[in-house]
Amino acid sequence: MTNPHEALLRERLKQLEPTLLEIDDESHLHAGHAGNQGGASHFRVWIEADCFNGKGKVAQHRLVYDLVNDLMPFPIHALALQTSIPQKGNS
């Protein structure tokens, strides 16, 4: 069963029109952790989007966090991000 918070996160991040979006629910790795109390979720996200082009990592991460700020610290307690711009083919 998919974590409902993952579906919410995925829906929010669609606004960035990603060419790649992978979300891993790592909540089970944080069982017993204070941030996991009450069902708060921990996610690892890989997102690739053209809107990151020309922006440093901090600015890329801000674009993501601006979309989910109201979800933190609950229902999402932690979000580990890996952002990048799409690689243009060399064919």
Image (cartoon, rainbow, N blue to C red):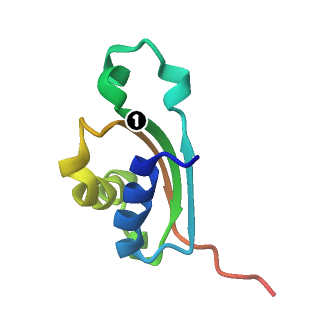
Q: For this view, does 63 lie left or right of residue 69?
A: right
Residue at x 33% of width, y 58% of height:
64
Relative image position of residue 68 (x, y in whole percent): 27, 54
Mark 1 is on which residue type? Answer: Ser
Relative image position of residue 87 (x, y in whole percent): 63, 73
Quarter of the picture holding the C terminus = bottom right
Residue 88 vs residue 44, the one in the foreground: 44
Relative image position of residue 55 (x, y in whole percent): 36, 65
Residue lying furthest right in this view? Answer: 91
Q: For this view, does 1 lie left or right of residue 34?
A: right
Residue 33 vs residue 82, the one in the foreground: 33
Determine the secondary structure under disc 1.
Answer: strand
Residue at x 54% of width, y 33% of height:
26
Q: For this view, does 78 lie left or right of residue 82?
A: left
Q: Which residue is mark 1?
A: 41
Q: How many marks?
A: 1
Residue lying furthest bottom in this view? Answer: 91
Residue at x 45% of width, y 51% of height:
6
